[in-house]
Structure formats: C-alpha cells, structure tokens
Image (cartoon, rainbow, N blue to C red):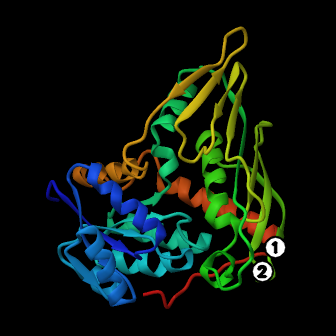
Amino acid sequence: MTREIRWGIVGPGRIAENVVRDFAVVDDARVVAVASRSADRARDFADRHGIERAHGSYRDVLADPDVDVLYIATPHPQHHAIALGALRAGKALLVEKSFTATTAGATEVVDLARSSGLFVMEAMWTRFQPAVVRLRELIADGAIGEVRSVQADLGVQRAFDPADRLFARELGGGALLDLGVYVVSFAQMLLGNPGSVAAVGSRFPTGVDAEAALLLGYADGRAATLTTSLRNALPGQARVFGTAGWIDVLPRFHHPQTIVLHRPGASPEAINAAQLGSGYAHELIEVTGCLQAGRTESAVMPLADTLAVQDVLEQAAGQLGVSFAEDPAAL
C-alpha cells in the first residue's frame, strides 16, 4: 500500500463532520471521497471539507479505485451490509460504534474480514485518548495493584421525539448502542469478558431503551457497575478500583483530559494528557499506521473485543425487552 492512505467517508452526518476535521493533524492520511444516498448532501459535505469526489450512492464509493479505507458513519443497523460490501470490494474499514446492531451481524463482518485478510477496526476513540493510554500504562505498571472493579456512567437528557434517529428502533436508537457502548467497552478493556450480565432499565414508547444499569460479573468476584441514559444527564465519569488504590477518569471519561491517581498515604496525583485535534485523530493515526504496516487488526481495539462488547450490549438490551435487526437494504 502507498505511504499516503486515501480515505472515503460513508455517511456525512454529525459524527463524520467532527471526525473529518481531525485529518488535518494526521500524517499520511487524506480524505479523497465522500458518499451519501443524496448526491446533493455528498457534494455539500465535499465542498465544505475540500474533498475531491462526492458519490451519490454507497456502492459508488465502494467501487472507487482511489480509496484505500472507508470510515462508516451511518446508523448502526446499516453498518453490517455496507461493511460486507466494502470488504468484498477489497476496502479496509473503520466502523463507527456500535459496530453493528447485532452480535450475529458483527460476527459475520469479522469473519469476512479475517478470511479476506483485510483490516477492520471499531471506531472506539476512547481507547486511543492519551489520558486513557496513560491509565492503562499505570495499571500495567501496578500503580493500583490488581484491578477489581470499574464504575462508569454516560448519559444525556433528550426530549422524546419518535422522528429522531435516537428513538427509532429500525435505526438502532436507544441509550445502549449510542452511549452504553462506551461504558461497556471501557469495562471490557480493563476487566476482560464478563461471565454474567444483569441489566435493569426502561424503554421509550418506540421500544428502544431509555436508560440502563448494568452489572457485569466475573468468576473471581470482580465486577463492573455501568449506567447509561437518554432520559437524564449523567456526569460521564469513570473509576477504576485496585487492591492498592484507584484512578478517577474525570468527565467526560470517553475522551478525558485528566486522570487522578489515588494511593494510600499519598496525595492525589492529577495527570493531564492533551488530545490531538478534537480527539478523533488518535484512532485515525492508528488505522493509518496499521495499514502502512500491513496489519489486519489493531492491538488496541482488536476485533475480539468488539465482538465481546457487542455481545454484552445485546444481552443487556434483551433483558430490557429490546431487540435490533440489521438493515439488509442499507447498500
């Protein structure tokens, strides 16, 4: 692959608007194409961000020979069909979280990526934030002993609107897939795959989850207590408890600037770590570097972790009486 990695954007929505700006601080990466189901919307996005080509269909960008990797930023249930089509077209992928709408859909994408030898990564920017990288280094160095439990919350207050994507089941709405994915991925990153998942919560009239509290259990007694909501705002803080201290990840923990190390007999130690750009640059740097090195997975956000997180989300949703389906007509 050439040194410069050429990117295409699939789905020019709000998250893509934020992500595309961070390419300005990523070396050897350039956005060359954008695709939407609306040619006018694609052209408007391209013009505003200085992108060469605007495609009026997703199939067209999959066929674009000048695109090495696609960033998929469409609603969750559309990821599955677009990702499969992209892999069959030989494209590497960065797929916005949640990775898919279902565990079965995620497994199918991962299996095809692995059999095709193509790079795929979930766009969980939290794992690449400098403050979170430092957190993991401290834990690996034994700064708080053995990690025994994790707490995390993330929630916003949204007025119920059945016309809004966040409240539409067919578009993967609800708290779990949009916000709960952060707390679950954070816990899984530090504790591994849970042996049990228990969830309580409530639903909106459209059938999607409004809020959820999760208890992830492990055979050796470790645990994660996680909260997410679209019904009310939450601080967005995380705490990691160990046998020799704890670390606070200050709000909002999914893209933090500061962590605070607490150890018995010592004053709290605040550690600041600034982000590049708006914070999305770090995952873009990871993908670009992996492609240049010929890797098919990220060691920081491996596909096995994506599948584990998707499974926890699906179990939790099921306990709340919520189910999702992939959109086969997305492509």
Front residue of 170 and 319: 170
Quarter of the N terminus within the rendering: bottom left
Residue located at (64% from left, 80% from top): 164
Amino acid type, label 1:
Arg
Front residue of 215 and 30: 30
Which structural element holds mark 1?
A: strand
Residue located at (62% from left, 23% from top): 261
Indicate which disc residue 207 carries: 2
Mark 1 vs mark 2, CA separation in Å: 6 Å
Which structural element holds mark 2?
A: loop
Residue position marked by numbered label 1 in the rendering: 203
Within the image, what quadrant is residue 172 found in? bottom right
Quarter of the C terminus within the rendering: bottom left
**Residue 33: x, y in percent?**
25, 74
Q: Is residue 276 left or right of residue 235?
A: left
Residue located at (77% from left, 80% from top): 207
Q: Is residue 331 left or right of residue 315?
A: left
Front residue of 144 and 281: 281
